[in-house]
Image (cartoon, grey):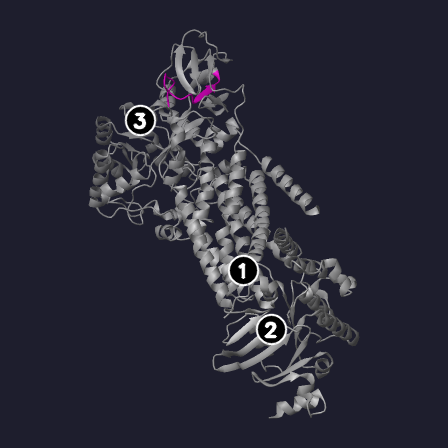
């Protein structure tokens, strides 16, 4: 029985005159991948930041893991069950991958042990390297590992496979699918149509801060023939 | 148990991170030591005795790392988004702050010991064992308000601006509190300004250990420092909340 | 586990370092400050005594006796050397390590004529105690009284200045409040012929001296010429802290000082350095003492290219002689550490100068012991007598006739502890 781990109604965010999000409704269910498609500046980052309470927003309703978020604060208890992968400039550049993961694993009560995490993501080869010395793709792998370190029930992935080579991307997709079948609700922002098509159960399309299309994958594809066509069509109007 | 583990790890890794940045901590340690050797020993033109100058320059040297460690590290963490990721994770903010305080204390401890040894060997400073220990304790514990100043600055400044602004706060404050030239040699207005500076009260407490304070009650200085600490904690808290808006 | 070991190692390291930092040497059990010493030839500050033994109890002199007293105290056996009170330098300026340096030459008390009031306050308590100490006792003026931009304001020290007579009582009160033992004033006569910094007026001088007296404290005056000295004495000064050499003291001045009981600290060592600059070298060569680096530094400084007429030097000696003959109290002061002087050493140079001015040996010794003690009412210093501190100097037996013995003290005691 799928449970809504994320439930948003009427979310809006403005920066001065500019409306970054306008009356957004979104729901993500356990055991499903929700892909949020949109070009840069469409509001994907504002969406994640709002949900995470990183900045102020207005909303009619926002529930995370079944609990209403009445303020911007996200309690420690809620954060124990969240996982986030974001685009970062550089983590603490002079800690090794192992140390980084060790630190993060210590934050979670019910997460991975650091050794398990390294096993899981095959990070042995780069475990002793400093984060600052990793390639773009390797960084993404580590950031993903960090995101799932706590075995989250709700996982946000912001452009997770940018810069990865084909094998790495496929490996990551496999992990995503595994977590999905474990019951995690996954919200994935991407602008790779193929990724969305392959992984998503549900799709939402974001343009200028508004949801212009949402539904199951098949619902959104509808008569357009492919997700790509559907995307282009929706973005036209 | 897990909670303790978290704090220990956070502190340990912060220290490790610092240790791996010799470009940061080496100058940060050498600066006060060099300053002391030059202006506290070799070119000591003022009335300060060896003991007096050691205490003054120890205060000067301890305030620096507390402020810099926080200010530059926090500003940098903010700029690079590292702090964001930690905030999203269930890391209690207190662990982050405490970890940084721990590493700034270790820093400060190193500086204090080096200064003590330098003073003992090159300036003939002689103190009873209880005085050395008491001085060390006062110096270390008293870094708290300055760590908070650093934290506040780190939360407010960009990582490029942080070092410059910290210096702009640190150096004049140290000078006007009588840490370079003993306070009795500064013009009277400076003495009045000093009462409003935490560095002055900090230094007076340290001087009280060797009997060279200006003679005000210790409790006055303690109260001033506690007051500053509370005020700064409130400001830091406020600023931290505002960061999310 | 590894972390705990690391932590433990760190704690041990810290302890190891801190516990090995230098501590002040504590008294050996053997070096107690209670003892009997003798037989010695005692100069008590005024005259030679008949007694041959001195008893010291916890740093205080308790008894002089003819025979060795039968007491259960450590006995320092001597062979008839001279024992005299530790020396008092009546005119110095101290900071930094000065009080320690003075002890090197047996100067156990100093009178500071312009210095940091905080420094003075910090060292006050030690004056009445006999804890082991490595520094001389200090009595001081704190901040001197001078005119705006007057002498004393050129060092960057925030000296409060006097601009009108009615401000004198407050100026005095402030200084006494911050710990001054007496009031020191700088004054130059209005018509003085040489270049000098601005000075307070005669009226202001009078008012300040009066205010000091009303507050039951001494007022001493820095002067640099005969006319200024005359004014100061007329205005009621208790003492002049410098000699002068523009002309020898005339009869009027001599008589006035004598009847007023005004003392003088001629500071001839300083003036010799200024006028001739030979005595230091002569004495250093002849006596070859051990001088610390800082002493050498201040000795080597000079007053620059000032050319004074040769007779100024003679005037200086003549004035001192006349005043001595008239019974005016002469106090020995060096004005260290001004150029050509050094703490401790220069007092000995001053004593040599006093002898050249014609003072007999006992009067020279008196000028550096009981005379300043009496003039400044020092409670426990400057004499060997019951109730005085055991600040003592042991000299070769030839010190009864040869002043130079002072350059090679055999032992110095401060607060009854031998240094």
Query: In the image, C376: left or right of B43?
Result: left
Label 1 neighbour load within 10 Å: few <14, some 14-19, many 20+: many
Residue B9 in the image: x percent, y percent?
A: 64, 54
What type of secondary structure mainly makes up the magenta span?
loop
Residue located beneath label 1 in the image = B71
Magenta region: which residues?
C382-396
Q: Residue at x 59, y 64 (%)?
A: A78
Residue located beneath label 2 in the image = A6
Q: Nearer the viewer, mark 2 or mark 1?
A: 2
Q: Chain of mark 1?
A: B
Q: Chain of mark 2?
A: A
Residue C222 appears in the rendering: no
Q: Are marks 3 and 1 on the same chain?
A: no
Give me the disc on residue C377: 3
Dot 3: element: loop
Q: Chain of mark 3?
A: C
CB of mark 3 within 8 Å of CB of mark 1? no
Q: Nearer the viewer, mark 3 or mark 2?
A: 2
């Amino acid at each position: 029985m799928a449970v809504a781990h994320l439930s948003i109604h009427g979310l809006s965010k403005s920066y001065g005159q500019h409306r970054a999000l306008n009356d957004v409704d979104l729901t993500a269910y356990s055991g499903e991948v929700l892909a949020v498609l949109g070009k840069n500046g469409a509001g994907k980052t504002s969406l994640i930041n709002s949900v995470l309470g990183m900045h102020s927003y207005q909303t009619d309703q926002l529930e995370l893991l079944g609990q209403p978020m009445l303020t911007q604060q996200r309690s420690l208890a809620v954060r124990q069950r969240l996982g986030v992968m974001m685009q970062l400039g550089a983590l603490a550049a002079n800690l090794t991958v192992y140390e980084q993961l060790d630190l993060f694993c210590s934050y979670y009560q019910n997460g991975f042990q650091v050794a398990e995490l390294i096993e899981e993501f095959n990070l042995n080869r780069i475990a002793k390297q400093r984060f600052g010395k990793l390639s773009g793709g390797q960084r993404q792998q580590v950031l993903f590992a960090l995101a799932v370190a706590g075995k989250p029930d709700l996982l946000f992935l912001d452009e997770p496979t940018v810069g990865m080579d084909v094998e790495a991307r496929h490996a990551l997709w496999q992990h995503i699918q595994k977590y999905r079948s474990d019951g995690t609700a996954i919200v994935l922002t991407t602008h790779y149509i193929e990724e969305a098509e392959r992984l998503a159960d549900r799709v939402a399309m974001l343009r200028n801060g508004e949801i212009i299309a949402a539904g199951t994958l098949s619902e959104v594809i509808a008569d357009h023939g492919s997700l790509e066509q559907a995307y282009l069509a929706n973005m036209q109007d | 148990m897990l909670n303790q583990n978290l704090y220990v790890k956070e502190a340990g890794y912060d220290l490790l991170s610092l240790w791996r940045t010799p470009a940061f901590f080496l100058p940060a340690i050498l600066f006060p030591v060099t300053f002391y050797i030059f202006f506290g020993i070799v070119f000591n033109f003022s009335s300060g005795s060896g003991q007096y100058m050691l205490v003054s320059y120890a205060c000067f040297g301890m305030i620096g790392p507390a402020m810099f460690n926080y200010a530059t590290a926090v500003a940098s963490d903010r700029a690079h988004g590292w702090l964001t990721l930690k905030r999203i994770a269930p890391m209690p903010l207190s662990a982050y702050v405490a970890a940084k305080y721990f590493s700034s204390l270790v820093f400060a401890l190193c500086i204090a010991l080096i200064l003590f040894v330098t003073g003992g060997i090159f300036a003939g400073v002689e103190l009873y064992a209880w005085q050395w220990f008491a001085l060390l304790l006062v110096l270390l514990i008293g870094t708290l308000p300055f760590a908070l100043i650093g934290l506040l600055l780190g939360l407010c400044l960009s990582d490029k601006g942080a070092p410059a602004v910290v210096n702009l706060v640190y150096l004049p404050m140290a000078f006007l509190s009588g840490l370079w030239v003993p306070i009795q040699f500064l013009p009277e207005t400076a003495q009045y300004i000093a009462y409003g500076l935490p560095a002055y009260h900090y230094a007076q407490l340290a001087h009280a250990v060797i009997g060279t304070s200006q003679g005000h009650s210790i409790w006055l200085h303690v109260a001033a420092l506690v007051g500053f600490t509370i005020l700064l904690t409130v400001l830091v808290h406020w600023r931290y909340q505002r960061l999310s808006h | 586990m590894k972390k705990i070991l690391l932590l433990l190692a760190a704690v041990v390291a810290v302890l190891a370092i801190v516990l090995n930092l230098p501590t002040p040497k504590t008294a050996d059990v053997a070096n107690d400050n209670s003892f009997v010493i003798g037989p010695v030839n005692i100069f008590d500050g005024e005259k030679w005594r008949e007694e041959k033994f001195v008893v010291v109890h916890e740093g205080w002199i308790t008894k002089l006796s003819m025979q060795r007293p039968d007491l259960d105290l450590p006995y320092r056996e001597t062979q008839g050397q001279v024992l005299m009170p530790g020396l008092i330098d009546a005119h110095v300026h101290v900071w930094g390590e000065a009080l320690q340096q003075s002890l090197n030459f047996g100067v156990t008390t100093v009178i500071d004529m312009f210095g940091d009031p905080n420094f003075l306050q910090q060292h006050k308590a030690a004056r009445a105690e006999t804890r082991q100490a490595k520094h001389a006792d200090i009595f001081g003026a704190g901040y001197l009284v001078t005119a705006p931009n007057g002498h004393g304001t050129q060092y960057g020290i925030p000296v409060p200045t006097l601009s009108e007579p009615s401000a004198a009582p407050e100026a005095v009160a402030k200084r006494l409040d911050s710990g001054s033992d007496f009031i020191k004033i700088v004054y130059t006569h209005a018509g003085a012929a040489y270049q000098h910094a601005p000075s307070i007026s005669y009226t202001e001088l009078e008012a300040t001296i009066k205010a000091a007296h009303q507050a039951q404290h001494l007022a001493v005056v820095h002067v640099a010429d005969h006319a200024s000295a005359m004014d100061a004495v007329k205005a009621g000064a208790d003492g002049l802290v410098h000699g002068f050499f523009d002309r020898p003291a005339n009869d009027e001045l001599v008589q006035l000082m004598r009847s007023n009981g005004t003392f003088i600290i001629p500071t001839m060592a300083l003036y010799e350095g200024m006028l001739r600059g030979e005595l230091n070298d002569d004495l250093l060569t002849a006596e070859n003492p051990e001088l610390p680096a800082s002493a050498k530094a201040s000795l080597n400084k000079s007053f620059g290219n000032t050319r004074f007429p040769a007779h100024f030097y003679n005037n200086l000696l003549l004035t001192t002689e006349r005043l001595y003959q008239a019974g005016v109290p002469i106090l020995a002061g060096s004005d260290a550490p001004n150029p050509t002087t050094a703490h401790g050493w220069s007092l000995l140079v001053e004593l040599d100068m006093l002898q050249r001015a014609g003072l007999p040996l006992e009067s020279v010794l008196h000028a550096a012991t009981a005379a300043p003690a009496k003039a400044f009412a020092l409670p426990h210093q400057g004499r060997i007598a019951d109730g005085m501190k055991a600040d003592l100097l042991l000299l070769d037996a030839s010190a009864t006739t040869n002043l130079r013995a002072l350059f090679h003290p055999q032992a110095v005691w401060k607060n009854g502890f031998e240094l």
